[in-house]
Amino acid sequence: MKPKTKRAAIVALISSAVVAVALLVWWITRRRAERGIIGVSGTSSEGTGNIVTGVVQAVIDKGKEIIGMKYFTISELTRSATARQLGIDNTPNATVRANLEALVVNCLDPVRTIYGKPIIVTSGYRCPELNAAVGGVVNSQHTTGNAADIKPASGGSLEGIFRAAVQFGDFDQMILEEKGGGRWIHISWRASNRRHRILLYRNGSYSDITSRWEQYV
């Protein structure tokens, strides 16, 4: 092998090794975040996997393109403290998992991109048993993997996420939910017949605020 060809081969090999190591570091970091090992100041350690992603964003771009999901993971969309506490298996089946992936790729990631800051998933998929345990409605889109409840990480803005979602526009349904002094955003996506509807949940009832949402955020 000629010296120049040999050097080129060595450089290519080293480059491949660096990328492989970077991917491994990202994967380990991501898994640790998903298990709640890594915490973020001012936020719960649960649901922070998408925050950690930013640390290795530049390195993992290619990998994310292959995976198809940029900021969120199936793990953080299925994790539940209530399920752990009650011993409920909240593992999604193939159909639900496909819905969750579509929710991330087609809705959550675009909203996160527009918003430009970390978003925490407080509730994603809920199997029927878990949904009943937390008091969810029987036909909740959480039970099919089509919806997630989200809020900003520390230093973020619920209004900012809401406006980003409105700017994105192609959701099925978005609900500004208020309960027990807390506020969060429920957002859903489905493959067809998206309603592009905005609701307010307050005092146990829903009202349509699609044309007047700015009065409430």
Image (spheres, rainbow, N blue to C red):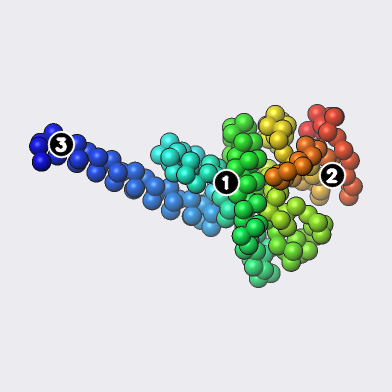
Position of residue 34 relative to residue 207, above or below, is below
x, y (%) of residue 45? 57, 52
Query: Residue 201 shows which numbered tag?
Result: 2
Q: Which mark is residue 72?
A: 1
Q: Which residue is most to the bottom?
A: 87
The reply, left or right, for residue 24 in relation to residue 210 is left
- Percent x, y of residue 158: 70, 36
In this rendered view, identify the residue nearer to me: 161 or 44. Answer: 161
Q: Amino acid at mark 1?
A: Phe
Question: What's the residue at 81%, 50% (across, down)?
Answer: 180
SS at mark 2 in the image = strand
SS of the residue at dot 1? loop
**x 82%, y 59%: residue:** 138
Q: Nearer the viewer, mark 1 or mark 2?
A: 1
Q: Which residue is mark 3?
A: 5
Residue 105 seen in this snapshot: yes
Amino acid type indicated by mark 2: Tyr
Q: Position of residue 101 (x, y in %)?
A: 60, 49
